[in-house]
Image (cartoon, rainbow, N blue to C red):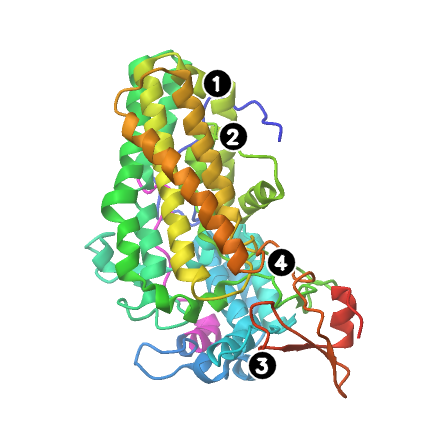
Amino acid sequence: MAIGKAPPSFNVLHDTRPDDTTLPSFMVSTTRGFLPRQEPIVSLPLAFTALESILSRMPIKNADGLPGLLAHGQLGATVLKELPDLSDRIDEYQDDLPLMNALYRDYSFLASAYLLEPCHLRFMAGESYGLGRQTLPRNIAMPIAKVAALAGFKPFMEYAGSYALFNYRLADPTAGLDYSNLRLIRAFEHGLDPSSSEAGFVLVHVDMVQKSGGLVEGAVDALDAIAANQREGFNEGMEKCSILCFKMNEIDVMRGMWKKSKPGDYTSFRTFIFGITSQSMFPSGVIYEGVSDEPLSFRGESGANDSMIPLCDNLLQLAMPSTPLTEILNDFRSYRPGNHREFLEWVQGRAHDLRLRDYAMKDTSSAALYLHALNQVREFRWRHWCFTREYILKKTAHPTATGGSPIVTWLPNQLQAVMDQMISVSEQHNYLPGCADIMDLVCHQRETLKKEVKKQNEEHGNATLSFTESLISQRVKDNTNTLAFCHPREPHHKTQITAGEAVVLGVTL
């Protein structure tokens, strides 16, 4: 992919102007990093009372401990009965961009819950996911399309704008962003209980990203130092990035995921964060009533849409292989807030123009710091792979991740690229101080990764198969003119599709 020439500077905020409602919620800053400029809006205006009412009753377990609408499959009927189309009311508030972000968050929660409610019920009954609802009704489709456009997102749940980074509140507004003070605003499962695994899953990400201001500052400092040919300033910027990532990996955040979000609980709420693209639940996309006569398709919520590690990739000029898996990584870029995308593109272009890697390689101390920074990216991706193995691969046979990437092979694609670049850097210098143990670990991990991917592919029946390719040859036609199919690892869990759906899938009844 061609990288355009970048301007010498980017407007990174130092004052986030939290009271300015004319600016989008997400603007990169040195103080809040990739978090929104202000704390997310919790309550909606009275005009949206019907929406607020349904969302408050929606979770599998409500804040009062009683079963919610999703517990027994009552959400769909409630939406059709109680929710008016509030599209026109949005116009009254459209200049308040943080409020548009809050409405986008809330409508995206409702859209995902509505579409995936049948899949959740089947999965909890021990069946495969089957098909989701194939049409999003007008009373959700019209408003989410409008607020998504105003807030700068796609009309489906995203990581930053809805599920994670705009979905927390402070229990004590004066106590700041300490993890113990974070609570969810919206949830699918038991997430309104701060000790629940869904709360832990989301809030660990918030806790991670609240530290990103130092990473932004370090990246900009390193680039500015190259432009001024200040070796010491470059080294300080690289060290700042490495220390921040080390804290994220080893001290504060990633290690805490195991305790705060239990592996055995993840699949109980994971169903609701799946997307449409490349998912068996939506083989022909979803019709958005009143928005498009053609089916629409969007990727699901994914931590891969966070901006911290992609910032490191772009800054360090990490060379990704030219593969379909990397194309998915590139597609994820469009599922970030616009200002985040622009900043990451600027960093990529600026690092390319200044030839950051070459600059680092010209000095032993700089090369060592560069390798240490790469090592933190490797460490993050290795932990992410371990999470995937324990939270997902051991719990379900579904072949795709929530964002639509192949569950087994996608993360190793990026992890292998980091390891290869680390080996290349190490080979350019006979000795880099403090790096011998790192490189021993990399060589060991690279071989371990190859074995694990091979093992997981064998156990999961080649998770890179497309949905159509995963249809088994045993086709059972019944008197309702439907076709029974199943995933190779779930031969007893059959899902029915209609003749029309079979045409889309390219199979014959």
Q: Residue beneath label 4, please? A: 278
Is 145 displayed left or right of 265 in the figure? right
Q: How many labels does the image show?
A: 4
Q: What stretch is highlighted in magenta?
A: 27-55
Cα distance between the residues tagged 2 and 1: 13 Å
In the rendered view of the protein, which quadrant contains the C terminus? bottom right
Q: Which structural element holds mark 4?
A: loop
Categorize mark 2 by other alpha carbons within 10 Å: few (<14), some (14-19), many (20+): few
Label 3 sits on residue: 80
Q: Badges 4 and 3: C-beta atoms under 8 Å apart?
A: no
Going from N to C along the chain, the mark reached first, 3 or 2, is 3
Residue 46 located within the stretch drawn in magenta = yes
Specify few, some or many for label 4: CA neighbours under 10 Å numbering under 14, 14-19, or 20 or more: many
What residue is rendered at 34% in x and 84% in y?
66
Q: Assign the N terminus to one quadrant of the image.
A: top right
Of badges 3 and 1, nearer the viewer stands: 1
Q: Disc 3 or 1, which lies upstream in sequence?
A: 3
Q: Is residue 304 left or right of residue 67?
A: right
State which mark lies toward you, 2 or 1. Answer: 2
